[in-house]
Image: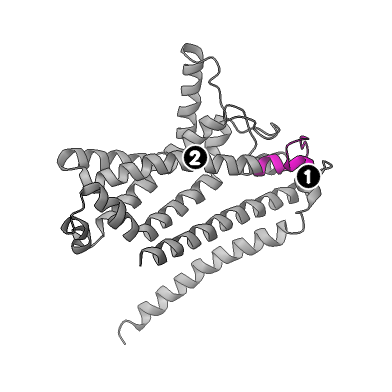
Amino acid sequence: MKYTFFKLLFLVFSFFAMSLVYLLLLFVIFKGVSSISLEMIFSDTNVLDAILLKQRVFDGIFPAIVGTLMLIVLSMSFAIIFGLSSGIYLSIFARGKVKSFLNICFELLATVPSIVVGLFFLLLSIYLHKRYLDNFLPSLLLSSLALCVLILPYIVKNTQLSLDQIPKNIRLLGLNLGFNSMQNLIFILLPYCSKELLSGLFLALGRACEDTAVIMLTGAVASAGVATTIFSKYEALPFYIYYISNEYSDQSELNSAFGAALILLIIAISLFVLTNLLQKRIRKKYD
């Protein structure tokens, strides 16, 4: 009975936090659903021609949708390769001062503001362009690398913690069966904590979907069309929302920003659903 007050207090705070989240979602849905249309996405361009990239969309947000998906796929590809590898090394192989030093480095990297990361990569592209690479300019590739650096600490620490929390008897199971360290890692440890690993990847996906400061300094522009190569400038929904919200001239343009925000939210939710389905499939397979 003496803890009833605290339980009630925590319940109220939890309900308040949940209400804020759902209120935000309902607001975006209410403002955005009436704005979404084929005209908003494709303007006056033929839908099939736009999807097949036969005709450029000038006034619609189709290039921004494609650019956002390309940015997510490319940045997550880099982040997964380096993040999982680093997290596995820290948990399984790193020892002593090396492990402590790397942990401090990744923890510090997680505290760096996104605008600083974007500024660093912008200056890096200018330096490399002047000294070594004539064609190395702000582009989809540069934005993907910048986003990779931004989300890398979350994947590294999540991978490390997921592997560290595996019970000792599970960690030794493969070794006792005659597996070497790599076989034990691939066939026992990673499948065992696959749900936790995918949860961390989803959180990183959410960060990759929404960040604006990084991409506005490293390659995102207002009207670039669909990027034809990773070295091209591109459009993205977060930058589109930021640009329209600051430069709108009437209510219809502001409503289109809410429509773009709803589409971005749908993309994030779709990625969450895919991640959740993959979690269940992997866990069912290895169970």
- Residue bearing the label numbered 2: 75
User: Residue 15: x percent and y percent?
Assistant: 49, 72
Callout 2: helix, strand or loop?
A: helix
Amino acid type at circle 2 is: Ser
Residue 216 in which image quadrant:
top right
Q: Quadrant of residue 262?
A: bottom right
Q: Look at the numbered disc 1 and give the secondary structure of its residue.
A: helix
Taking the magenta stretch, the answer to whether it contains residue 63 is yes
Q: Residue furthest front?
A: 178
Report the residue at 31% width, 46% height from top.
Answer: 87
Of residues 122 and 181, which is closer to you in this image?
181
Q: Which residues are magenta?
A: 49-65
The alpha-carbon separation of the residues under discs 2 and 1 comes to: 28 Å
Mark 2: few, some, or many residues within 10 Å (few <14, many ≥20)?
many
Decide if residue 12 is on the left or right side of residue 61: left
Q: Does any portion of residue 78 appear in the rendered image?
A: yes
Look at the picture and state if 73 lies above or below 279.
above
In the picture of the structure, the residue carrying the numbered disc 1 is: 48
